Image: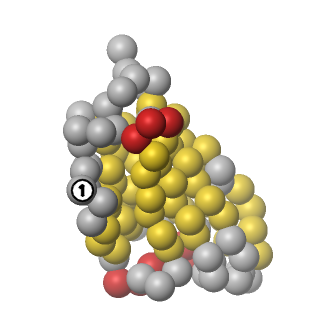
Amino acid sequence: QVQLVESGGGLVQAGGSLRLSCTASGSIFSINDIHWYRLAPGKQRELVAVITTGGSTNYVDSVKGRFTISRDNAKNTAYLQMNSLKPEDTATYYCNVGLWGGKGTLVTVSS
């Protein structure tokens, strides 16, 4: 059974950076798009970034220019580089790959 594990979250001051990772226990990356979502308290789940199998990327407007999604199929790992973090980026971040999802990693940005 394939498992996805997100990591890299933590507490950071506004303006700081974090790099999230999403690693799968099986070879599922090469044939699936990868999505990063986030869920903040009291808010709906939000799609933050997508990277297709061909490497095309798309971002929600609020993170454009600050976040970068990437993938390493050989390592079955995806990344979300987050720079210039803002308090409103505080949320639990989840990755989805095809039918699989992880339990998330918490990002807290202090002002």
At horizontal 51% and vertical 54% (from top left) the residue drawn is 79
Where residue 109 appears, as percent x and y from the top left, is: 68, 71
**Protein image colouring:** secondary structure
Residue picked out by circle 1 = 54
Q: Residue furthest top?
A: 1
Left or right of residue 87: residue 25? left
Task: Count the labels in the image.
Answer: 1
Q: Give amino acid for label 1.
A: Gly
Q: Nearer the viewer, residue 99 or 43?
A: 99
Q: Is residue 26 above or below residue 40?
A: above
Q: Nearer the viewer, residue 73 or 12?
A: 73
Residue 30 visible somewhere in the drawing: yes
Left or right of residue 32: residue 88? right
Q: Nearer the viewer, residue 104 or 70?
A: 70
At horizontal 70% and vertical 83% (from top left) the residue drawn is 15
Label 1 crowding class (10 Å Cα cut-off): few <14, some 14-19, many 20+?
Answer: few
* Quadrant in the picture for residue 107: bottom right
Residue 106 visible somewhere in the drawing: no
Left or right of residue 77: residue 56? left
Where residue 53 appears, as percent x and y from the top left, is: 25, 51
At horizontal 48% and vertical 69% (from top left) the residue drawn is 68
Under tag 1, what secondary structure? loop
Where residue 86 appears, as percent x and y from the top left, is: 61, 81
At horizontal 75% and vertical 68% (from top left) the residue drawn is 12
Image quadrant in which the C terminus is located: bottom right
Where residue 59 appears, as percent x and y from the top left, is: 34, 74
Image quadrant in which the N terminus is located: top left
